[in-house]
Image (cartoon, rainbow, N blue to C red):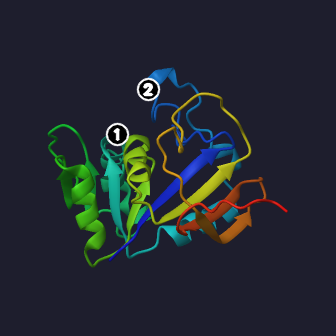
Amino acid sequence: MRKIILLEFMTLDGVIQGPGGPEEDTSGGFQYGGWVAPYFDEVMGAVMAEQMKEPFELLLGRKTYDIWAGYWPQHGANWAGVNETKKYVVSHQDQKLEWENSILIKDDVVEELKKLKSQDGPDLQVYGSANLVQTLLKNDLVDELWLKIFPITLGAGKRLFVEWTIPAAFELFESKISKTGVIVASYKRAGEVRFELIE
């Protein structure tokens, strides 16, 4: 059995939309794309290099897939294995997947994701993919959260946690702080939420 791991850049108020650039995701009138760049230093570079190491497979929502499929096939030298690995793409519509080793998941999404988790193979990494992330959190399919929390608030935009996220406990297993104030915090699933009275 393998894990589903969410790797997300997020603001203090939980926004994960459009971190990479102004045109990355402007849906809903989002105007703040590219908000990670001013905070990306050598610490963040080292963190990402470690987290993006092989072996891995990718689990992506359609919008993130479309963005990446337009970039990584020409820039694969910057991320070892990204073009060769399997890429599972969750979409509600039929889509021709041009990027090599891409596999569409369209029907019975939750059941198909459960089957993927139960198989042997590399862990499944999820980047961005805000809509897919909600399906994963709602159905308790997330094993680990690898978060990078940036010292800004945006007020508007797609968020990591929304109203249908289930109650769940997580355990911090790794953390550090970049020179620019980004908190890198990695959590693993740790059972149910416990309720206790404070004495």
Q: In which quarter of the image is residue 84?
A: bottom left
Residue at image mark 1 = 63
Amino acid type of disc 2?
Ser
Query: In the visual, does 174 lie left or right of 54?
Result: right
Q: At which x and y percent is residue 16? A: 54, 42
Amino acid type of disc 1?
Lys
Residue nearest the viewer, comparing 130 with 95: 130
Q: In which quarter of the image is residue 175?
A: bottom right
Q: Earlier in the sequence, mark 2 or mark 1?
A: 2
Instruction: Report how far apart the C-alphas of labels 2 and 1 lie in the structure.
Output: 11 Å
Query: In the visual, does 10 lie left or right of 142?
Result: right
Q: At which x and y percent is residue 188? A: 54, 69
Query: In the visual, does 54 lie left or right of 45?
Result: left
- Give residue 27's mark: 2
In the image, what residue occupies the spot 54% across and 44% down?
Answer: 161
32 relative to 101, above or below: above
In the image, what residue occupies the spot 50% across and 58% down?
Answer: 7
Asked whether the beta carbons under mark 2 and mark 1 sit within 8 Å of each other, the answer is yes
Task: Give the structural element (helix, strand or loop) at label 1.
Answer: helix
Q: At which x and y percent is residue 69? A: 30, 48
The single residue placed furthest to the right in the displayed view is 199
The single residue placed furthest to the top in the displayed view is 29
Q: At which x and y percent is residue 10? A: 60, 46
In the image, what residue occupies the spot 66% across and 61% down?
Answer: 184
Q: Is residue 100 visible?
A: no
Residue nearest the viewer, comparing 43 with 105: 105
Q: If the image is split into quadrants, where does the C terminus sit?
A: bottom right
- Give residue 47's mark: none
Q: Can residue 122 be seen in this view?
A: yes
